Amino acid sequence: MKRKLIKFDIIHPPEYLAQKKQSWPDINSLSLGEYRERLIRLRSNYSDFYTYHLNQTGEWDAEEFFLLDDTFLEKTAQELFGSYHKLKKQWYSRKNTRLRFNPGHWRDYVIDQYIQKVKPDVIFVRSQPISSRFWQKYRKNTLLVSRLSARLPFSWHPNHWDIIYTDQPDFKTFFELHGVPTIINNQGFDARIITELEVREKKYEVIFVGGLGTQNFSKRTTFINSVASKTNFKWWGYWWKYGGDGRKMEEFPALHQTFHGLTSGLEMFQIYKDSKIVMNDYVDTANGIGFNQRMFEVMGCGAFMLTREAPNFKGLFPDDVFATYKNERDFLDKVQYFLTHEKEREEIAQNAQRFVIENYDYTSIAQDFSQDLIQSLAAKSTNS
């Protein structure tokens, strides 16, 4: 019998999903399964990169549950409660919030009912918009698994999980000090993406995709604002509006002028593919370690990446799969060089794609993940 897994994740950024939903005139007519597949086909965030390849092993019946999406939640409620789901929603809000409807309580109730219906062996919370305390009521009969590579979320505690996955060595040390089994698992790339991209003439010279702002990305924001005015630069992404010193994008003139809007998923991958140079920077995060998801996305698409130099590169990556920079002057010099050396640039991009597919494809990541989970389930069963 196949083991069951539900992966809880989000489309990121949420504003991108809101834009896409406005362009879908048939959204109300879609079943839960059809709507889930449409979200997956966006290829946003981690898409079905884990669940698809888990299912391919033959050991799992794995599925996606998308958080922070009211449409997905309502379609789930419709599947659970049928034509009575609106009455159920009204009844539940009165029962729990004294006649004031609380979206968070309704969300938690629907998730709870769905978990009771599916009875998963594993709950894999890949994104953390819900307090980790919420999942504790399932811990007796379910393996609770989390993955974390960004800063610790609010209302999240390592001891709420049976296993934590991360790509950050510092996190592994920290979580294991709390007595939680922690496994380093790599970022990766799904080779299916390659067949979903168009191969066409390059449209952009130098681009960046990601988050900017004065809290999580303060140094990166200042750096990119400086170089953006000195080269033919464009960027897509989002402005982190929480915390920091309160400055808005408009107060960074070069960033404001070169911003081209939200992007995510397959549209983002196509931007990488259409660009001569894709910039990467992680100066504010990961203690200076270069191993963010963007690296593998860019290389996997067959795009040329110019990334900030990091101490962990030696031994992990060959010398011919990307170029690095140390500071602003070095960055601008490398941009000028690689814009005028197309053949060398394209050879490096091809090397990068081949390297990532051979070493960081989700097929092998999911196989390792599957074996870890099966062993952990067996150990949990023995100890219960």
Image: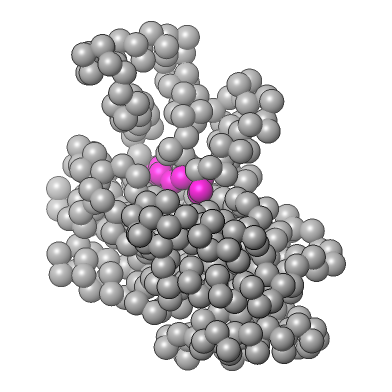
Please say if 298 is above or below 49: below
In this view, the residue in front, 105 or 159, is 105
Give the residue displayed 23% in from the left and 18% down from the top. 97
On-image quarter of the N terminus:
top left
* Residue 171 image offset from top left, x and y in percent: 28, 69
- x and y percentages locating residue 104 in the rendered image: 32, 30
Give the overall secondary structure of the magenta segment.
Answer: strand
Residue 240 found in image quarter:
bottom left
Q: Which residues are magenta?
A: 4-13
Q: Nearer the viewer, residue 15 or 150?
A: 15
User: Where's residue 37, x and y in %?
Assistant: 60, 38
Task: Report whether residue 58 is seen.
Answer: no
Q: Is residue 296 above or below residue 18?
A: below
Query: Which quadrant would residue 3 be assigned to in this image?
Result: top left
Indicate whether residue 9 is drawn in magenta: yes
* Residue at horizontal 46 percent and vertical 23 percent from the top: 74
Residue 246 horizontal side relative to residue 234, left or right = left
**In percent of the image, x 42 and y 39: which residue is there?**
67
Image position of 157 (left or right of 6): left
Q: Is residue 253 above or below residue 113?
A: below
- Residue 199 seen: yes
State yes or no: residue 124 in magenta.
no
